[in-house]
Image (cartoon, helix red, strand yellow):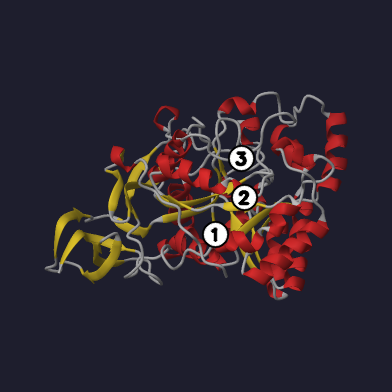
Amino acid sequence: MQYDLLIRGGRAILPGTDGVAADIAVRQGKIAGILSSGSDAEARETLDASGLVVFPGVIDVHLHLGHGMDIARPRAPEDAAGETAAAAVGGVTTFVPYLMATDPFEAIFDDVRAMTEAGARIDFSYHFIISTEAQLAGVPRYVQMGVPSFKIFMNNRGGEGKRLGLPDIDDGFLFRLCEAAAEHGGLVCPHPENIEAAWVLRDRLIAQDPEGRGGLAAWNASRPPFLEADAVQRAGMFARQTGSRLYIVHTSSRLALEEGKRARDAGTAITIETCPHYLTHSVDWSRGDVGKINPPLRERADCEALWEGLAVGAIDTVATDHIHRDISCKQGGIWKASPGCPGVDTLLPVLLNDGHYRRKLPLGRIADLVAHNPAGAMGLAHRKGRIAVGLDADFAIVDLQAEYTPRRDTLKSSAGYSIYEGVPLRGRVRHTLLGGRFVLRDHELVSDAVGRGRFVARQPG
């Protein structure tokens, strides 16, 4: 049999390993064989991966794909083209943004899907943000459409959702969403914060520091870890009582992680996610307001607790919560600056640099955190997440020894900045392949990859 592509001489991160010398054969966009290194197989094209590590394509299951300052949805193919370019640089071959609207999603999704496919360099799916009665009633249809995961902002109360154009919800709405997800094989992804208590703390802090000179420490104090942990506990209880699966997004603190583990020990089917910025950045970061994120950056002790959670298996996935608003959104001081930061282009490099090199996190564990586990949690394991025969031939091929420093003039995201600017990173993605075809080759984007990405229907749990 002649293959379409043969990746020769690399160290492949196969399931359950930290790397095996192997040749990987690709045919018709799928992994067709995992062969002994130096095999006599033939292919139309051969990629010499000697000295390189072949990871399964990274899957970022938490980001926001919008248009300009709006993070609700893409409005032009260029929105998808730019952010999937950044994704390819980071070895991401599939991502799952959150789609935000007040309309029933069946009324808008065909347009959103077509717009994304017109510009996407990588494959994608979507989560739906549920905030209206019509959307809640649509959960069974959404699962059938291949979108079985549903975000809910637990903090959208008392007008808090107006910033995002969303109505208020309450715990009763969360409970009913958990019921619907349990009945139809869905997954609930709550943004966990007790906003009522946060208002009390915020108002006190603003009275003491109206100009926001306290910076990131003040932002952390206005939405402290115990308010995140309280909401994780509440969501865990609702999921356990209804039988729903739960995916806790952007875990930022030791207290929230402890509540997530407690819910798991009590029987909740829970997946726990964190983000690179909560591992590497804390309230003492020198660039201040640029680091305003929600939940806030925490104390250094919280960063270390999260690293420990990754090492021992308490945390299941790492995703970016990538937001591509440009740097102008950070103006006005800590109380007025917009929360969020980009990060899809540095997801795997940061885990290699800070996780593998600095903390001896095994390569196989990193592959689990950014590929295998996200695929399993989100209903993508039938196609993505592992280097295994029959799955999509999606790869991030890494030079572990290469060092590079993100610079503003080389970034691909429309955000135009990175919280890792000027930070030397060891471990760089050299090639990114989707379905056995190059999206990034020798660090350069492949121009004809634009529009190649496709929506991937996900399976219910």
Residue 27 visible in the shown view: yes
Pointer 2 with pointer 1, Cβ within 8 A? yes
Number of the front mark, 1 or 3: 1
CA separation in Å, label 1 and label 3: 19 Å
- Neighbor class of circle 3 (other Cα within 10 Å; few <14, some 14-19, many 20+) is some
Q: Residue 207's quadrant in the figure?
A: top right
Answer with the quarter of the image where residue 283 lies. top right
Residue 294 location, x and y as percent? 68, 43
Q: Quadrant of the N terminus?
A: bottom left
Counting residues from the start of the chain, the first of labels 1 and 3 encountered is 3
Q: Residues within 10 Å of mark 1 (few under 14, many from 20)?
A: some
Q: Position of residue 58 (x, y in %)?
A: 43, 55
Q: Which residue is mark 1?
A: 145
**Amino acid residing under circle 3:** Ala
Residue 72 got which mark?
3
**Does residue 282 appear left or right of residue 402 in this picture?**
right
Residue 157 coordinates in the image, percent (x, y): 82, 46
Check the image and name the residue furthest to the front. Answer: 107
